[in-house]
Image (cartoon, grey):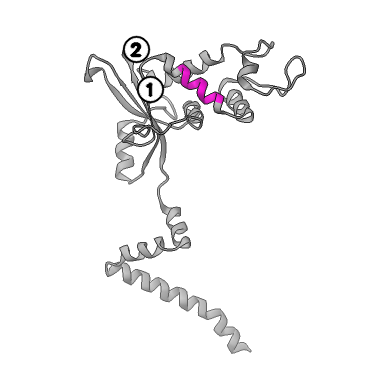
Amino acid sequence: MSSAKKQKTTAPSLITLCTDTLWKESIKGGGADELVAALQACPKGRAALRKITPKSIDCIGINRACSDGINEGFSAYLRRNAATEILFELLNHHDAGDAFDALHRTGGDNISWYSIDELNDWVRACVEDMDLDEARAFFFHEMQIRIPKKDEDREPVTSAIEWLEGGDDKSDPDWIDKVVEKVDKLLTETEYDTEQQESPNLISAEEMLSYNNQRIPMKPHAVFTINTDGW
């Protein structure tokens, strides 16, 4: 019984040692690509690779241009943080449609505006697409507006927009102007402070180079193109 017990405890160690040696020898012999291919060919291998794959950078692209030419243009990426989260939340409810140019060539939804009225319409459409619980969370976290379950007449609130514009003491008929103002500032800001803030909104050129060198992928959720002539 003792010899059987000894064999049971040493066998896994020998298997592990042999496997480790085979991997090292395979890599030395130029078989790294084959090992990766073998890992990609099975669910457990793909799960293992995901653990070491650099996490992509969630971001939003912004382009600004006008008829004065390229010198007035601006192109950059905004990182996902507490300040820009409002854009990502609205994008969750953006209807890209089936247009040929619905996706931008650099990644994400392609959204182009020639006037702030289009931004206003976009914000309303995104909020209208939210269900009531999503709208409650959005307005509470982003605008510090609490949408109740019942209105002043003790009737159930069934629509966030109807309640906001309905005239209750705690409602806010100017909600869309406030949301548009926050979004407009993020997309048309002219001075991005990348040194004084702990987590600046703008991804600097130095950071972009660092991401490229580390093979860290960018993940644009959308690219907003703003024609400032109509702003």
Q: Is residue 145 magenta?
A: no
Closer to the eye: label 1 or 2? 2
Q: Which quadrant, please, contains the N terminus?
A: bottom right
Q: Nearer the viewer, residue 118 or 76?
A: 118
Quarter of the image holding residue 187? top left
Q: Nearer the viewer, residue 149 or 162?
A: 162
Quarter of the image holding residue 129? top right
Mark 1 residue crowding within 10 angstroms, few (<14) / some (14–19) / many (20+)? few
Q: Position of residue 78 (x, y in %)?
A: 39, 29
Q: Position of residue 113 (x, y in %)?
A: 37, 20
Label 1 or label 2, whichever comes before in sequence order: 1
Furthest-right residue in view?
Answer: 154
Name the residue that disc number 2 marks: 230
Residue 64 against residue 10 in the figure, above or below: above
Q: Which residues are magenta?
A: 120-128
Quarter of the image holding residue 73? top left
Residue 147 against residue 31 in the figure, above or below: above
Q: Secondary structure at mark 1?
A: loop
Name the residue that disc number 1 marks: 193
Mark 2 residue crowding within 10 angstroms, few (<14) / some (14–19) / many (20+)? few
> Do residues under tags 1 and 2 come within 8 Å of each other at their CB atoms?
no
Q: Who's the residue at 41% across and 27% down the image?
A: 201
Q: Disc 1 and disc 2: Cα gap in Å?
A: 26 Å
Q: Who's the residue at 43% across and 74% down the image?
A: 17
Q: Secondary structure at mark 2?
A: helix
- Dominant secondary-structure state across the stretch colored magenta: helix
Q: Is residue 122 magenta?
A: yes
